[in-house]
Image: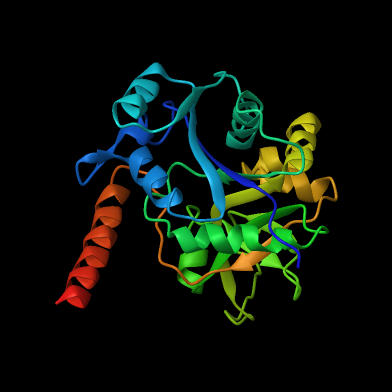
Amino acid sequence: MKSIPKCYGIIPARYKSSRFPGKPLAEILGKPMFWHVYDRARQCRELSDVVLATDDERIEAAAKALNVPVVMTRDDHPSGTDRVLEAARILQVPEGAVVVNIQGDEPTLEPDMLTTLVQPFVSPQIQVTTLAKRIDRSESESPDRVNAVFSRSGKGLYFSRSLVPYSGEGETTGYYEHVGLYAFRLEILERFVELGPSPLEIAEKLEMLRLIENDIPIQVEIIEHESVCVERPEDIDVAEKIFMEKRRRIEELQI
């Protein structure tokens, strides 16, 4: 029976952000955001290890104070995935392993989301995976949403900040939001970085387009979990409400 290769979770966390400087350190219910991401990710049984990768001494110090494993990386990476590769090399991730890029601004992620992300690697044909969830047209039209289009078998066809697929009548087979979690076989992650940013990636500011432009297939898996990507300070309130609602449900089950 085939099994999933060894999987390593890496959380890229940089201090500089045009819309939300210092985002990884933003407090959510008394703890920095990166801690929530780490705490959720380490509950995924398929991950052998989970480590924070940063380029900022303030984030490094906060991680060490909270006993979160952390490695320091360069500050000139063009994307979070480039930072993940440097961290994987520092950690000496072995050949044949799967490296999971866990976005540091997804504090409400569910461990099962990561399980769904890595399960396809049972098949040796799978090289890269990511996630998507169903949304309505009004959500899809927001530039803060990244839309995913994929084939019936789940092969990623395109990712965009624009409304895709477009329908003048407002009718379509459905809209899907790309969820910012990725998993790569180590050799594909290395190739990703060697390729450098691609034209569509630069235009859309979406690194997954680097793979599509270079004919590297991406497997898109569908999830139904509720999660929020923190893009701006006001998104903190949304994340806290989700945490409080989950806590309320757990307390009700214990009564």
Look at the image and tell me whether residue 231 can be seen: no
Q: Residue furthest front?
A: 1
Q: Residue drawn 72% across and 69% down?
A: 154
Q: In this view, does 37 lie to the left or right of 241?
A: right
Decide which of 219, 5 is in the foreground and name it.
5
108, above or below 211, in the image? below
Q: Is residue 218 visible?
A: yes
Assign the N terminus to one quadrant of the image: bottom right
4 relative to 29 in the view: left or right:
right
Q: What residue is shown at x 30% (from left), y 54% (from top)?
A: 239
Q: Quadrant of residue 199?
A: top right
Q: How many numbered marks does the figure carry?
A: 0
Q: Nearer the viewer, residue 119 or 27?
A: 119
For residue 193, side relative to residue 241 (left or right)? right
Percent coordinates x, y for residue 45 in the rendering: 51, 56
Q: Horizontal and vertical percent for residue 165? A: 66, 69
Check the image and tell me how it is coloured: rainbow
Q: In which quarter of the image is the C terminus?
A: bottom left
Q: Residue furthest left?
A: 255
Q: Is residue 52 above or below residue 8?
A: above
Residue in the picture at 51% in, 61% down = 113
User: Where does the image place residue 58, in percent across and percent down from the top left?
Assistant: 35, 20
Q: Residue 207 occupies which quadrant of the picture?
A: top right
Query: Could you tell me residue 252's position as x and y percent?
Result: 18, 75
Q: Residue at x 44, y 31 (%)?
A: 69
